[in-house]
């Protein structure tokens, strides 16, 4: 039985807004977002299959996809903002708790929860923050399906554990669920070690650092792009070859050096990155994963597979409702997240999948907004911001 759980809690949630106000923000060239603030809201009510988590630490996410949707006369294009902040500005629903990545302890357990959970267990994972009033991670408590979280091993800090959310699960979704790379431990992983190659564009992002490691676990040779200042970083996470994305000769150098290249993950998915990836695999009629869910390829013969990690929760959802795109339930994606988190404790404990570099932002709800502003202004690179909550 759970004890000492209050009826209300603190949460960083969005304010109410009008449809007209949303239209103005979308049409404006300025970064005008409707506000979010620390509010007092009800503690989430559990269903039979859910766990209530007392949140101790959250990670803040940079953008994982652009938003190039044309909606009536309004055109949304390449908004360089954190995914958490995008939900504050426009994508989310009013009155919703922000935040996706978390670590904490189990406070209460539903009657039919999957997994061997006990009150007080250390737990981490990811939720779909920004569109629900009771699921975001920037709160004293959150709720999550029992099989869509992972148990934090001894020796791993809450700050580290909180980073295996949006970025890690996106990397898993892209490589294992979308491109079909073998999972860690599969026979194909060792049998094909080093015999296949993948391009991971923008290797210094948190998602790409996880993707580099997951690709290596699958037995792949990894090519990546980044700025020269990040060369040592991406190599330390397993990259075999590194190219400067700003060098106009890099694309042709990759094509010449890797004539059998047929798989790519566009870890940036903005500007010309998707075209770069498509052209890199075009000679083999390859496949590219884009983190822009509405991306389309302009390169003939290339299969472009756009993803959005929120499909991993097994729920239908929409963005920028009621006028934005809708995404259906994908049972296979949900099963993939459950499988990944069941494997993650051993992968982390063994050192096979390491967290990205961390920058701790301090303690308390008042540290959330400053971190979001740093991300929104593009002042964070090669590290993950983490905030401890009381």
Image (cartoon, helix red, strand yellow):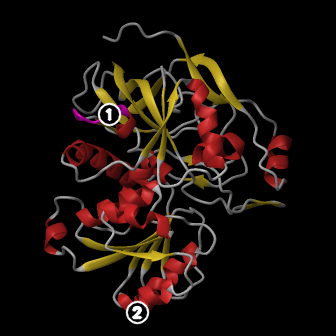
**Is 158 situated above or below 297?**
above
Main secondary structure type of the part rendered in magenta: loop
Q: Residue at x 39, y 60 (%)?
A: 233
- Regarding mark 1 in the picture, which secondary structure is present there? loop
Q: Quadrant of the N terminus?
A: top left
> Is residue 318 something one can see in this rendering?
no
Q: Which residue is drawn at 18% across and 75% down?
A: 192
**Dot 2 corresponds to which residue?**
256
Q: Which of 102 and 310 is in front in this view?
A: 102
Q: Position of residue 298 (x, y in %)?
A: 60, 82
**Residue 54 in magenta stretch:** no
**Is 76 situated above or below 31?**
below
- Regarding mark 2 in the picture, which secondary structure is present there? helix
Highlighted magenta segment, given as a residue range:
153-158
> Is residue 118 something one can see in this rendering?
yes
**Dot 1 corresponds to which residue?**
157
């Amino acid at each position: 039985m759970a004890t000492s759980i209050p009826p209300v809690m603190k949460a960083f949630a969005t304010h109410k807004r009008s449809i007209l106000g949303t239209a103005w923000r979308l049409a404006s060239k300025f970064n005008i977002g409707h506000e979010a603030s620390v509010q007092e809201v009800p503690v989430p009510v559990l269903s039979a299959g859910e766990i209530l988590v007392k949140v101790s630490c959250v990670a803040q996410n940079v953008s994982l996809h652009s938003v190039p949707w044309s909606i009536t006369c309004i055109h949304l294009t390449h908004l360089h903002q954190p995914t958490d902040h995008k939900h504050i500005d426009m994508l989310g629903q009013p009155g919703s708790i922000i935040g996706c990545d978390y670590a904490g302890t189990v406070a209460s357990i539903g009657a039919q929860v999957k997994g061997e959970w006990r009150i007080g267990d250390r737990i981490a994972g990811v939720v779909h923050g920004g569109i629900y009033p009771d699921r975001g991670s920037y709160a004293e408590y959150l709720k999550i399906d029992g099989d869509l979280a992972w148990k934090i091993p001894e020796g791993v800090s809450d700050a580290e554990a909180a980073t295996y959310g949006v970025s890690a699960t996106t990397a898993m979704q892209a490589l294992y669920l979308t491109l079909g790379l073998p999972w860690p431990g599969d026979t194909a992983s060792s049998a094909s070690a080093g015999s296949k190659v993948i391009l991971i564009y923008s290797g210094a992002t948190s998602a790409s650092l996880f993707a580099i490691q997951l690709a290596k676990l699958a037995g792949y040779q990894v090519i990546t792009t980044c700025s020269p200042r990040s060369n040592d970083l991406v190599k330390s996470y397993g990259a075999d070859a590194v190219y400067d994305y700003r060098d106009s000769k890099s694309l042709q150098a990759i094509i010449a050096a890797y004539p059998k290249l047929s798989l790519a993950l566009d870890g940036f998915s903005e500007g010309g990155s998707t075209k770069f990836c498509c052209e890199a695999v075009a000679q083999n009629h390859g496949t590219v994963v884009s983190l822009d869910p509405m991306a389309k390829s302009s390169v003939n013969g290339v299969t472009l597979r756009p993803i959005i990690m929120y499909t991993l929760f097994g729920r239908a959802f929409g963005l920028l409702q009621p006028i934005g795109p809708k995404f259906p339930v994908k049972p296979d994606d949900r099963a993939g997240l459950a499988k990944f988190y069941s494997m993650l404790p051993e992968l982390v404990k063994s050192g096979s999948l390491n967290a990205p570099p961390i920058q701790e932002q301090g303690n308390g709800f008042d540290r959330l907004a400053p971190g979001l502003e740093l991300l929104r202004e593009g002042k964070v690179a090669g590290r993950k911001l983490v905030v401890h909550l009381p």
